[in-house]
Amino acid sequence: MVTSPSSTACRACKQEVQRLLSGLTEDGRISLSVYETARVVSSLPDLPGHTARIDYLLATQGQEGRWGPRDAGYGLIPTLSAIEALLTVQAAGRGGSPIISTVQSALRGLADVVPGASLRLPDLPAADLVVAALVPRIDQHLSTVHLAGTAKLPTWVRDMGSHHGRRLNALTTRLSAATRLDDKLLHAAETFVAELAPGSIQPSAAGSIGASPAATAAWLATKPSGPGATAARRYLAQLASHTGGPLPCVAPVAVFERAWVLNWLRHTGIPVDVPKTIRRSLRRSLTATGAATAPGLPTDADTTSMVLATLTLLGEPHDPSMLRTYELGTHFCTWPGEQGQSVTTNAHVLEALSLYVRARPAERHRYLPVIRKISSWLLDQQQDAGHWDDRWHASPYYATFCAALALTRFADPPATPAMRSTVRWLLNTQRANGSWGIWCGTPEETAYAVQLLIQLASPRHPRYQVAIELAKTYLDQTPRNGGQPPLWHDKDLYTPETIVDTALLTTRHCLHSAPSRQRRDH
């Protein structure tokens, strides 16, 4: 019996889906964070894995002396965090020549950056607070720790720390008298926890402060005993035990991971038998104000809408009226009081409401005006070149993937002209090796671009087939899982590994089934 390539691909796809589902643990898979790991090194040297965390920092320094991507803006926070942590180790008498030379190299790396209009602090959560907290700590260390020469932070970094320090000072003054903090601040509590009144913060049920190892370690350093301290130490020790020491930026991320993975699998048409336990966990994540990415974080419109949309795709539509909590005059905020706005959050809200209306046609009159409002707002956010940008991902390819697919599937009225512009942008930005990417070509960004082309472009387009074949060759040479560059926004960049694996799997499925798809003729 001869096995056809299509049946072999189908079996491989089923095996990959099963691997993904079996990997949907209670913690989730997320990449390690230089920023968070360094904060734990600095705050909690007695936590098991301390030496491994220091080794991780030493091993991950880039050739330019900085940590993170080569983009100096994105690299600033992990670099400052690593410098401060290594100087803390040196000041405690536990360092040595490797640490000294690493810090010197890092300071040179920052000094080599040419500040200008193009250098800015990216829209990362609490980025201004983090820089404001780290710069004076580093300056204090450098005044006492002996390094060869006159080692110091460059002027542009110190100026940035001073500028953002005004907000941190105002925040700590306000919070010092508070009896309870706004949950959205807890994720960056390491920047101000020492100034808080005793008892104003307590760990979540998971044992974390704001689902952040850095915040939890900083809080634990101020309160080393008691029931809450025991839970917090357990939370950190368990995270560290999984890796031998280094920490991720946020944990656990089960709800976030499950909603995105299952949503993308369902939309791509890949058959998937979802275990009852996973369905139940998504249902239970919903509260009166929605779902949170992780215990200890506030509920938000992005996670809520993806959970709602995914449950509808699984045949369990839930009333989305909880999303009204996040509705503004023209669009939806990620959470009340958000500083900024998110294209991807609104794309996901559009999806959740539209899928619900399709499942419950009698509710159309309630949500159609809102669907039209979000559609209009998303179209207004499209850049002249044809793409979208967003505050939760460094790459325009993810933002465009979310916005363009939501508008294609759910916009009222249809958004055909905007999609033509998106197709042109995609074809014009493909790299010579078949990939797409903001800094360099990456499998993740290429996956988003390929799925968009398959959905939006006509196979009769003169450049379509060449672009698809080049991308297929590039992706065929890519490992099937793991090791993708971090592009998602937290206090530094991270990779939600199972979600990115799903993007690659669904793209391969789309490439396999593309000839039989009916596409819009753009």
Image: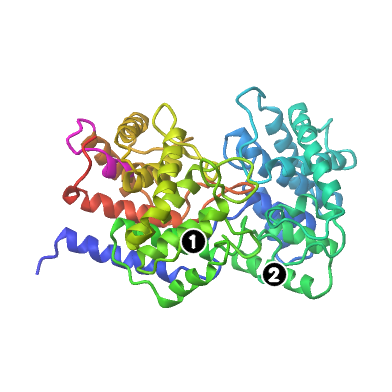
Viewer-nearest residue: 9 or 210:
210
Q: Residue at x 42, y 47 (%)?
A: 369
Q: Label 2: which residue?
A: 207
Q: Position of residue 460 (x, y in %)?
A: 17, 35
Indicate whether residue 456 is drawn in magenta.
yes
Residue flagged by tag 1: what amino acid is it?
A: Glu
Residue 66 falls left or right of residue 286: right
Indicate whether residue 30 is drawn in magenta.
no
> Is residue 442 visible to the viewer in this orientation of the structure?
no
Identify the disc placed on residue 69.
Answer: none
> Is residue 110 visible to the viewer in this orientation of the structure?
yes
Identify the disc placed on residue 257.
Answer: 1
Residue 221 falls left or right of residue 185: right
Q: Residue at x 45, y 76 (%)?
A: 277
Range covered by the magenta-colored residues: 452-463
Q: Residue at x 69, y 68 (%)?
A: 204
Residue flagged by tag 2: what amino acid is it?
A: Gly
Q: Residues within 10 Å of mark 2 (few under 14, many from 20)?
A: many
